[in-house]
Amino acid sequence: MASAAFVAAPFVRGAYAAGKLTLAFWDHWVPNANDATKALIDEWAAKEKVEVQVDFITSQGNKLLLTGAAESQAKSGHDIFALAHWLPSRYANQLVAMNDIMEPLIKLNGAVNGTVEYLGKVDGKWLGVPATVGSQIKGPCSRIDLMKDLAGIDVQAMYPAGAPAKADAWTFDAFLKAAEACHKGGVPFGIWSNGTNTTIAHLTIRDTWDNEIIFNPGAQSPRESYLRLLLIDAGLPRPQTQIPVPGVDGIPLAYLDLGWPEYMVAVEYDCDQHRTDRRQFVKDIRRLEMLERMGWNLLDLLGFNHSRDFRRTSFERRS
């Protein structure tokens, strides 16, 4: 029996025969949401014989954002990192292509939602596998009775319970007509707007120019948005916005307007206050010296007004 056990041993799979994975997920604020995620992971891990360590990282104080930025710069950290919102495109040059996983899944289950593809795929490269936790699928809310009474649209008939949708006629033009009808009926509808991430997610606008996102949640001023588009128009890769520069304790010492953290290069736009206010001017000098000691190359554009000003500065800097 001892001999038989010895011979059979190499063919017995241990509890964690397939190795170990470390995962980082957003720490969801909905009660028990993390437990549901963890249960699915544990079920998969047991089946595949993989030891899995899951870290749920809070978004409070931008900790999740800072952790991703730190691991990106260190090129070390979790094996799998849950990226929310527009973060996949921010790290497009560093993420491993997931086409070998996504293409069979799409072939088996059909095309993914257009919003998911727009956020998760850049230049034909899938940057991640879509997940439901923290997704950008914003389900609409409407008053079924008002849509029927004022706009003549039977929402329940278009989307019958337990049956395929019958909504081929529900186009954007139909939506606008419904909006006009409800407005005339004294019940206008629309979307609230403020500076929260949820609003920003709703208000993303696609431009016809290479599907670039005009509205970016990191922009702190119209001039910064203009500068970002000029950078792309000049042929540079899409820059990251509001780049955190963490200190030794992980707390950010500064945030840079735009740039490419993987190359330690940043571009900033400063209004006239940075030139006319002596206190701000001195503070900027000390900040610049600190960043240069940390290895950052900073291009500071002070009150530029025309795209040709930037292009001339850009090409002089390149040379």
Image (tube, rainbow, N blue to C red):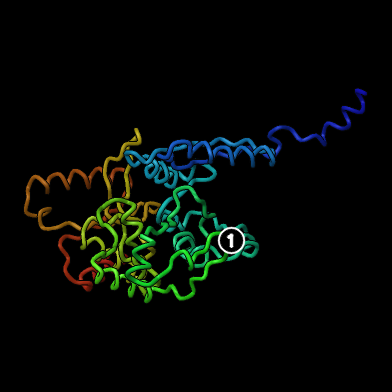
Circle 1 residues within 10 Å: few <14, some 14–19, many ≥20: some
Foreground residue, 32 or 8? 32
Residue that extends furthest to the top in the rendered view of this protein: 2
Where does label 1 land, which residue? 99
Residue 306 lies, in percent from the top left, at: 19, 71
The residue at the point 32 percent across, 56 percent down is 200
Q: Quadrant of residue 22?
A: top right
Left or right side of 40 for 74:
left
The residue at the point 52 percent across, 55 percent down is 130
Q: Is residue 155 visible?
A: yes
Foreground residue, 80 or 172? 172
The residue at the point 22 percent across, 47 percent down is 288
The residue at the point 62 percent across, 62 percent down is 109
Foreground residue, 48 or 296? 48
Left or right side of 56 for 6:
right
Name the residue type under label 1: Asn
Examine the rendered structure and indicate whether residue 125 appears above or below residue 50: below
Identify the image quadrant of the C terminus: bottom left
Q: Quadrant of residue 1?
A: top right
Residue 113 lies, in percent from the top left, at: 50, 63
Q: Is residue 259 visible?
A: no
Residue 191 lies, in percent from the top left, at: 29, 60
Examine the rendered structure and indicate whether residue 160 appears above or below residue 50: below
Residue 77 lies, in percent from the top left, at: 49, 41
Disc 1 on helix, strand or loop?
helix
